[in-house]
Amino acid sequence: MIHYAPCKINIGLQILSRRSDGYHNLSTIMYPVFGLYDIVEVIKTEDKSVHFSSSGLPLDCESEDNLCVRAHRLLQSHYGIGGVAIHLHKSIPFGAGLGGGSSDAVSVLKLLNRIYHLNLSPQSLIKEASCLGSDTAFFVYDIPMLCSGRGEEMHPI
């Protein structure tokens, strides 16, 4: 299965305070940008491991640390799912605040939900996504949102 993982822009990002967990409280509008995206492919395998490959822009981390792999391991630990082969074609530049890695991770969560028939609700996906990063929850819906907290408190606008 293939998913096109869009990036996002932040409109009016305000950093409000530092939290005790090391993150910041913020207020921002996150807006999906569908013209720039990564392509994530996930294929079910017979074993329990994850096989990761990539093309396009070079990645900024080792495969084991990639958010796509971490997303698989998260659902595997919570739901006992099997293995997959993940291929990421990277087009969204990293480190630009566009949320490419977060979008990729949520794409993996969405694809695993379908491939393994987990029937996770959007709220369950948001809970899982929030374990992976601050802006990941936004990509569950991919619609403009007013975001607060670490970015996981969202209200459609």
Image (tube, grey):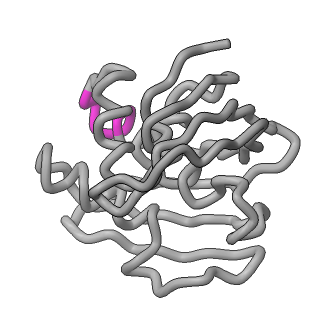
Q: Position of residue 119 (x, y in %)?
A: 28, 23
How many numbered badges does the structure rendering display? 0
Q: Position of residue 90 (x, y in %)?
A: 71, 67
**Residue sticking out furthest to the bottom:** 62
Q: Position of residue 74 (x, y in %)?
A: 24, 55
**Residue sticking out furthest to the right:** 35
**Residue sticking out furthest to the front:** 17
Q: Is residue 5 above or below residue 45?
A: above
Q: Nearer the viewer, residue 71 or 9?
A: 9
Q: Which residues are magenta?
A: 113-118
In the rendered image, residue 116 lying in the magenta stretch gets the answer: yes
Query: Does residue 136 appear left or right of residue 121 in this picture?
Result: right
In the rendered image, residue 18 lying in the magenta stretch gets the answer: no
> Which residue is rendered at x = 59% and y = 48% of the image?
15
Query: Does residue 79 appear left or right of residue 152 in this picture?
Result: left
Q: Nearer the viewer, residue 70 or 10?
A: 10
Residue 58 placement: quadrant: bottom right
> Which residue is rendered at x = 68% and y = 12% of the image?
157
> Which residue is rendered at x = 65% and y = 57% of the image?
100
The answer to whether residue 121 is seen in the rendering is yes
Q: Position of residue 143 (x, y in %)?
A: 66, 23
Query: Does residue 5 appear left or right of residue 31 in this picture?
Result: left
The answer to whether residue 107 is seen in the rendering is no
